[in-house]
Amino acid sequence: MFQGLMSKLKKEKKETVILLRNIPATVVTLFVVSVICMNLLANKTLLQLEWIALDGGILISWLSFMCMDIITKHFGPSASNRVCVLASLINLLTCLIFFVASIIPSNAGDYTAFDGIFGGTWFILLGSTVAFLASAVINNTLNWMIGKAVKGNPDSKTAFALRSYISTFVGQFLDNFIFSVIVFVFFAPIFWDGFCWTILQCTMCALTGAVAELIMEIIFSPIGYRITKKWKDNSVGIEYFRFIEEDNCK
C-alpha cells in the first residue's frame, strides 16, 4: 500500500512538472497574480447595503476564471485543477511572507496601515482558499462537461463562449457565496466587533458578483478564445499530451 502511494505521488509530481513546463508562462503568471490580488482585495468591503454587499475581490476574480477556462479548454480539468492548487500554495507562501514583514518592528515610520493590510486576517485567508479551490474544481469540471456535450464544432468560438459563460457564472457564484458565508457570517461577528453580513447579503453579493464577473468574461472571452486557438495551431503542450497518452496505454 505504501509503495503504491509513493508510486502515485511520483507520477503526480512528474505529470505536474511536465504540465508546468508546457503551459505558457504568461497565463500561469496572470493566474497566480490574480489569486494573490483577490486575497488582498477581499479585505475591503466596497459596498454594503441592506440587501447587497461587495468586497474588493470582485475587481480581479474574473481574470482567475478566464485563465482557468483557457487551461481547461486546452489541457483538461485535471491540469487546471493542478494549477489551481499551485496558485493556492503560492498565495499561502506570499501571505506568510507578508505576515512576517508586518510583524517585524520598524522605527522608520508609522506602518500601521501597511501592517494591517499585508498582515492579513487568518479567517479571510481560510475563506478565500476554501472558496477558491471548491469553486475552481466545479468550474473546471463544468466547463469540460459542457465542452464535451457541445455538438458540431467543439472548438468554435460559440462553443468556447458557451462553456466559459456558464461555468464562470456558476463558479463565481459559489466562490463568492462560500467566501462570504465563511468570513462575514461565521468569523466576522466574533473578531470584528459584531460586524457581519446576513445570508441574504451573502447571496446577493454572490449573485451580483457573478453577474458582474460574467460581464467581464463576455468582454474578454474573445481574447481567451484566440489564445486557445493559437495554442492548438502551435501544438502547445505536445509533451504533456504524449505523457498522458502513454500513461493511459499502460
Image (cartoon, rainbow, N blue to C red):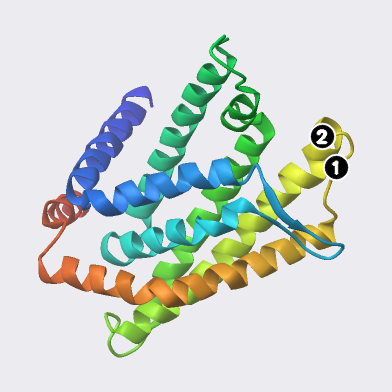
Q: Quadrant of residue 160?
A: bottom left
Q: Measured from the top left, where is residue 100 in percent x and y?
A: 52, 17
Q: Could you tell me if residue 250 is visible in this image?
A: no
Q: Is residue 185 left or right of residue 207?
A: right
Q: Quadrant of residue 171?
A: bottom right
Count of numbered circles in the view: 2
Q: Residues within 10 Å of mark 2 (few under 14, many from 20)?
A: few
Binning the other alpha carbons within 10 Å of mark 1 as few (below 14), some (14 to 19) or many (20 upward) gives few
Q: Is residue 157 left or right of residue 241?
A: right
Say above or below: 138 vs 86.
below
Q: Residue at x 47, y 41 (%)?
A: 36
At label 2, the amino acid type is: Trp
State the image quarter where residue 130 is shown.
top right
Q: Nearer the viewer, residue 6 or 153?
A: 153
What residue is drawn where x is 33% and y is 30%? 4
x, y percentage for residue 148? 36, 76
| Residue for badge 1 | 195
Please name whichever residue, 184 or 147, is drawn nearer the observer in this view of the structure: 184
The residue located at (82%, 34%) in the rendering is 192
Q: Secondary structure at mark 2?
A: loop
Q: How far apart, in angstroms, are the residues tagged by discs 1 and 2?
A: 5 Å
Q: Which residue is denoted by mark 2 in the rendering? A: 192
Q: Amino acid at mark 1?
A: Phe
Q: Are marks 1 and 2 in contact (CB under 8 Å)?
A: yes
Q: Nearer the viewer, residue 63 or 161?
A: 63
Q: Where is residue 41 drawn, in percent x and y?
A: 58, 46
Q: Is residue 203 above or below residue 25?
A: below
| Left or right placement of residue 174 versus residue 145 in this view | right
